[in-house]
Image (cartoon, rainbow, N blue to C red):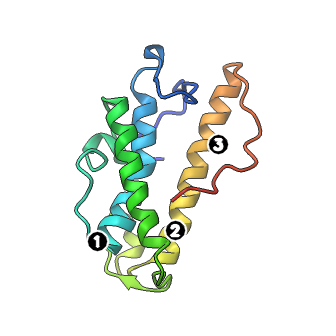
Amino acid sequence: MGGYRSSRRWPDCRSGDRPSRWGKQHSLDVGHVTHTVDSWINTRFQGLSPHPVISQPACRSGASGDADGWRSIQAAVREVRDASREFLEADHPPDLDRVIPYDGSIEQLRPVGLTLRYALMRISAHHFVHVGEIVTIRSRLGHAVGDFPDWGRDLV
């Protein structure tokens, strides 16, 4: 998981407020999982410009955790996800097997390219990895974590 530290503490993020005692990590993780949606779905497949907040180095793998501006990250996440939903839920849905050139950090994809199908699966798995991490840490800290039976329905 890049530069992520599993010893982080996680906030109860049900409200829009990020309690100050949790530091900047929550902003980083929300921005981080959204970065792939922006980079792959919106930028690569749709040809949109990278989102100015989500494309910041603080939201990428291996980041230092110095993401600021919880409210701006929340707004940016909504904008990125709205743009990807519009693309994926269009009247004429995109071809899941379309292959685009890939020059990113996953070396195995460079020679074969990136399909939309793979991108969506990888994005989904990435979200579940981070949710599992958050739930595990919160549970170990003694917080109620719940069962999330509907979680993941609106990933992208």
Q: Nearer the viewer, mark 2 or mark 1?
A: 2
Q: Which residue is mark 1?
A: 103
Q: Is the residue under label 3 in contact with that under label 1 (CB below 8 Å)?
A: no
Q: Which residue is mark 2?
A: 120
Would residue 105 be found to the left or right of residue 86 on screen? Answer: left
- Could you tell me residue 33's position as x and y percent? 45, 49
Q: Would you identify the image quadrant in which residue 40 lies?
A: bottom left
Secondary structure found at label 1: loop
Please tell me which residue lies in front, 130 or 76: 76
Question: Circle 1: is it few (<14), some (14-19), or many (20+) Cα within 10 Å?
Answer: few
Q: Which residue is mark 3?
A: 132
Q: Is the residue under label 1 in contact with that under label 2 (CB below 8 Å)?
A: no
Secondary structure found at label 2: helix
Would residue 126 be found to the left or right of residue 101 on screen? Answer: right
- Could you tell me residue 29's position as x and y percent? 45, 39
Kind of residue at badge 2: Leu
Picture residue at 30% right of the left edge, 39% below the top: 58
Q: Earlier in the sequence, mark 2 or mark 1?
A: 1
Q: Nearer the viewer, mark 1 or mark 3?
A: 3
Whether residue 69 can be seen here: yes
